[in-house]
Amino acid sequence: MKFEMIPCSEDDMEYIEEQVENAFNTIAQPEEAEEEEFVYIVTDESGNLLGGCILSVDALRTASIYDLWVEEAFRRQGMASALMREAERKAREQGCYLAMVGTFDWQAKAFYDKHGYMLNDTMTDVPKGHEHYMLTKRLDRPSAEYMPLDCQQYEIKRGNEKDAEILSSKLREYDSTVAPHEHEYISLRKKIVDENGCIIAGFVGGIDGWNGTDIDALWVEEKYRNQGIGSQLLGELEQELKENGVAVVFIEAYDWNVGFFKKNGYERVTGVLEDYPKGHTMYCMEKSL
């Protein structure tokens, strides 16, 4: 049978991502609950935003806390810790067993360490000359709560979409002063079609402004697996990454597909997260191009 690798349309991209999600869900068994996002803020008497964070809860009942931001004049007074406690409280209320945060070497790793987060993965040279860390904390186990000395009391309020946009823009603005983006996001996506034009495989990925890599989806229809098509797709993606100046590819694999990536040269494991998703293990891996 004749196959052809060609670029994807937006609809093709959504189809490929949907197939990967369906395959993931048959193994990981998400709960019925939908993904939710919560915004928490602190304001002054005039309603001006002084700090806040965003909590995202997924269908696997894992929580991601991101875009934590406090105006400079109010830092080291316990506001960020108060926001973290509220986000974790809500995550537990939503049935989350695990919280995840990402931070760069110029941001807040020491802060998360104090709050009981454990380092799971380090990506080096993303952006160039810096490191990115992934940290996690079990929410279903007892842990000592970090309380800064002489911290003030803050009223934590629920924010809205506009507040979330402000928090994100504040953090992006600060990050750009330390590590300016080299370019806009570069989207990479291709599909393999059969002689009738039907999609049988494809990948969706990209390169962020710091030359960090995303492999959002790599999929082969079940009856065409174990024929080298997945390796062909991955090789094509790696070639496009290399042509765009990427030197190292970072990926996340799971116990059910880690063998495929090892076979394709992803031999360096930079981090392991056990029981994610529940009953499984996630591996953070890298490959030099």
Image (spheres, helix red, strand yellow):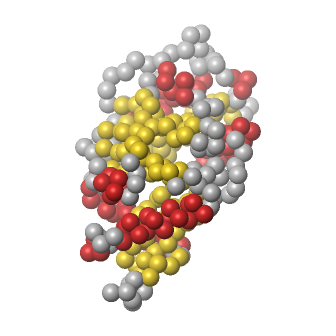
Q: Please tell me in which quadrant of the rendered image residue 219 appears.
A: bottom left
Q: Residue placed at 58% from the left, 29% from the top?
A: 108
* Residue 207 drawn above or below residue 61: below
| Of 213 and 139, the residue lying toward us | 213
Q: Residue placed at 51% from the left, 15% from the top?
A: 147
x, y (%) of residue 2? 37, 86
Q: Is residue 70 left or right of residue 194?
A: right
**Residue 18 can be seen in this image:** no
x, y (%) of residue 171? 66, 39
**Residue 125 can be seen in this image:** yes
* Residue 256 drawn above or below residue 89: below
Q: Is residue 9 left or right of residue 230?
A: right
Q: Is residue 143 left or right of residue 134?
A: left
Q: Please tell me in which quadrant of the rendered image residue 159 appears.
A: top right
x, y (%) of residue 244? 62, 61
x, y (%) of residue 48? 72, 34
Farthest residue toward the bottom? 196
| Of 201 and 29, the residue lying toward us | 201
Q: Residue placed at 38% from the left, 48% from the top?
A: 267
* Residue 90 drawn above or below residue 260: above
Q: Please tell me in which quadrant of the rendered image residue 243 appears.
A: bottom right
Q: How many marks?
A: 0
